[in-house]
């Protein structure tokens, strides 16, 4: 018991002798814990807000985007761009029975409009 009392008294004496260093250490620990709690709270708030927004949007909606065919070893079409066609829309509409509505969004980057700011060069329609 005496050893424990000596350790506590020596620790308190050291803390009292170095007040500024002790304060800065405790302040740094408190600041770190507070920052961590704030960031976790913000992250959880954003996550729950996004879940709420998606629940209001609906559970029977599907979004699809055009892109590039993934790289697969031995495939001749790897990395090639693909775009959805009206036939793809019809196939999704006919085969996806659990979707409430399907609306196609056809994006063509080869359609351009003249840009008066760039001396006659065309820019993509977005």
Image: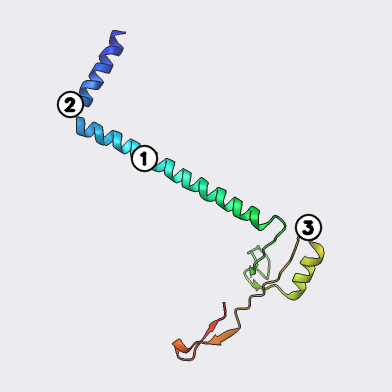
96 vs 55: above or below: below
The Cα atoms of the two marked residues, 2 and 3, are separated by 72 Å
Who's the residue at 42% across and 44% down the image? 38
Q: Which mark is residue 17?
A: 2
Residue picked out by circle 1 = 32
Side of 69 where 97 appears, left or right: right
- Residue 41 image position (x, y, % from top left): 47, 44
- Give whichever of discs 2 and 3 has the lower sequence position: 2
Residue picked out by circle 3 = 98
Q: Which mark is residue 1?
A: none
Who's the residue at 67% across and 75% down the image? 106
Rendered image quadrant of residue 8: top left
- What secondary structure is found at the residue carrying circle 3? loop
Who's the residue at 20% across and 30% down the image? 19
The Cα atoms of the two marked residues, 3 and 1, are separated by 48 Å
- Residue 110 image position (x, y, % from top left): 60, 82
Side of 2 where 79 appears, left or right: right
Q: Nearer the viewer, mark 3 or mark 1?
A: 3
- What secondary structure is found at the residue carrying circle 1? helix
- Give whichever of discs 1 and 2 has the lower sequence position: 2
Who's the residue at 70% across and 55% down the image? 59
For the N terminus, the image quarter is: top left
For the C terminus, the image quarter is: bottom right
Side of 82 where 115 appears, left or right: left
Q: Nearer the viewer, mark 2 or mark 3?
A: 3
Q: Nearer the viewer, residue 73 or 102?
A: 102
The Cα atoms of the two marked residues, 1 and 2, are separated by 25 Å
> Residues at badges 2 and 3 in contact (C-beta under 8 Å)?
no
- What secondary structure is found at the residue carrying circle 2? helix
- Give whichever of discs 3 and 1 has the lower sequence position: 1
């Amino acid at each position: 018991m005496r050893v424990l009392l000596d350790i506590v008294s020596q620790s308190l004496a050291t803390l009292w002798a170095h007040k500024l260093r002790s304060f800065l250490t405790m302040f740094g620990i408190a600041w770190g814990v507070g920052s961590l709690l704030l960031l976790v709270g913000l992250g959880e708030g954003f996550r729950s807000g996004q879940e709420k927004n998606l629940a209001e949007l609906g559970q029977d909606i599907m979004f699809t985007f055009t892109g590039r065919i993934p790289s697969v070893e031995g495939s001749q079409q790897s990395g090639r761009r693909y775009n959805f066609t009206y036939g793809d829309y019809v196939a999704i509409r006919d085969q996806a029975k659990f979707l409430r509505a399907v609306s196609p969004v056809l994006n063509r980057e080869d359609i351009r409009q003249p840009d008066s700011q760039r001396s006659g060069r065309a820019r993509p329609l977005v």
